Amino acid sequence: MTTAKSQRTVFFVSDRTGITAELLGKTLLTQFPGIEFLKRTFPFVDSVDKAKSVLAKIHDTAQKEDRPPIVFSTLINEEVRAALASDRALIIDLFADFIRRLETELGQESTHALGLSHGIGDELVYQKRMDALNYTLSHDDGMHTANYDRADVILVGVSRTGKTPTCLYLAMQYGICAANYPLTPDDFNELALPKPLQPQRAKLHGLTIQPERLAKIRHERKPESRYASLENCQGEIRAAEALLRQAHIPILDTSSMSIEEIAISILYGTGLIKRVKT
Amino acid sequence: MTTAKSQRTVFFVSDRTGITAELLGKTLLTQFPGIEFLKRTFPFVDSVDKAKSVLAKIHDTAQKEDRPPIVFSTLINEEVRAALASDRALIIDLFADFIRRLETELGQESTHALGLSHGIGDELVYQKRMDALNYTLSHDDGMHTANYDRADVILVGVSRTGKTPTCLYLAMQYGICAANYPLTPDDFNELALPKPLQPQRAKLHGLTIQPERLAKIRHERKPESRYASLENCQGEIRAAEALLRQAHIPILDTSSMSIEEIAISILYGTGLIKRVKT
């Protein structure tokens, strides 16, 4: 039983990128904040020899630290998986049990084929992601509004509410053509949507943020500027929210949200997921 | 036992974004290519009531299709998790067993706290990702080479080898300041690195690609152009590879790789992971 902050070494082992192993493993480890985890990732472990070489490192660590390392593995090939077996580590195999239960329920054997996630996989799906990313990069920050017919979603808000990173995430992960349009003081003179946005009402989604948080973010970029002052942030946000509400555009407060959370909220909160097939 | 391509409905249920549930679930499902999976994701299921409402949908589906849906869930709260229990679905709980095994090995109870992955989490780590993304966006395609001292890595290659999406992925997922510099015919007149790259040799990583694949990608953007012609692609690639080899820069062939695979190869193949702490 540990009381002081202790250390444990964790291995992530995968036959492909290791992204899945790291993601689920790190998610599980966040549940143990009292322990400091030293993380080592081994991607592309796709042969028995490579597995043996990782196993040797695991055993070295077990001996040096005098306790079992934690190992998260996603290995499809059974021989490679067998080569990593050890009773000197806690091996959490993220596939083995689940694959077996799925085989039973689905009445099929699994293919044991590698590289089916995070590879190019379906060429068309991959191409769609790359196309969306190109679209998003060239429709950042109010650029090329003439092409808004091709957009799946257009994020609207004042500077530094999270529009650009959210658009990039939606494009890269979901193949969504996501444009964004910054609201600036020029737009607040009349209480109407800027012209390029008016025909696109159904695709618009507003982002807002607490003024204190916005001032902090803007101060990091332009310290002591009027742009970053709390008073200015309050004014811009008040005006932007009024404009968006008047136009019946949904608004999301991003103050305590990560870009993943913003993206998922927009994807599932607005029917976007039904308009685009991801 | 199914022989023709059959359909199964799959639910992804999470108390936060659902990214982990979708990722591991979809990875497992790629092992069963004979089946078409209809996917429904329910993020932010963070109360017993919300879980009950999802369970009602699961039971509806079970009744309509006359067989159990597959459910991948990542629910931390035990009451919420209990509210989703059902014997009319195959429920694959991606946390329950693993958390218990970790508790035993680590000698600690887990916190059962929500939102620890894909949330903002550690503010400093999140800020590093956002800063890296800003850096990467403003150092795309050879821009602002004067700031290369701040770069963690600089990708070099001819147009359309995957430099920009890989840089964005490294920044967004790993907080890596990734710049990229395009090699153009102007650079091939002398067999030397372009001036802005010369002081940065240790950070450079070359990307290359098969000429046929490059011609295909370029044709989609600029059909029938000299830029996209196979002959031109062959010439550019030959010259770029000669230049990079001469300068002892590592080169990765991205022809059959996804951006995730390119990013991970660079991260773990070159010592970058040791230079930057992710």
Image (cartoon, coloured by chain):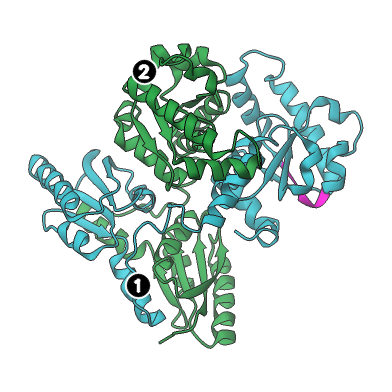
Chain colours: A green, B cyan
Q: Residue drawn at (54%, 49%), measured in percent from left and top?
A: B173
Q: Quadrant of residue B111?
A: bottom left
Chain where mark 2 sits: A
Question: Is residue A69 or residue B99 the one in the foreground?
Answer: B99
Callout 1: few (<14), some (14-19), or many (20+) C-alpha neighbours within 10 Å?
some
The foreground one among B239 and A159 is A159
Is the N terminus of chain A in the top left, top right, bottom left or bottom right quadrant? bottom left
Side (left or right) of A125 relative to B267: left
Q: Is residue B232 visible?
A: yes
Residue pointed to by mark 1: B110
For badge 2, the amino acid type reads Arg
Q: Magenta part of the protein: which range?
A: B201-206
Q: Position of residue B76 (x, y in %)?
A: 29, 62
Label 2 sits on a secondary structure element that is helix
- The kind of residue tagged 1 is Ser
Q: Which residue lies at the image location 20% right of the left edge and 45% below the top edge?
A: B2
Give left or right: position of B102 versus B5. right
Residue A204 sits in quarter: top left
Q: Based on the displayed image, in which of its 4 quarters is residue B135 positioned? A: top right
User: Which of the two residues, A46 or B157, is positioned nearer the viewer here?
Assistant: B157
The residue carrying mark 2 is: A201
Q: Evaluate whether residue B257 shows in this view.
A: no
Residue drawn at x 48%, y 16% is A189
- Residue B259 drawn above or below residue A40: above
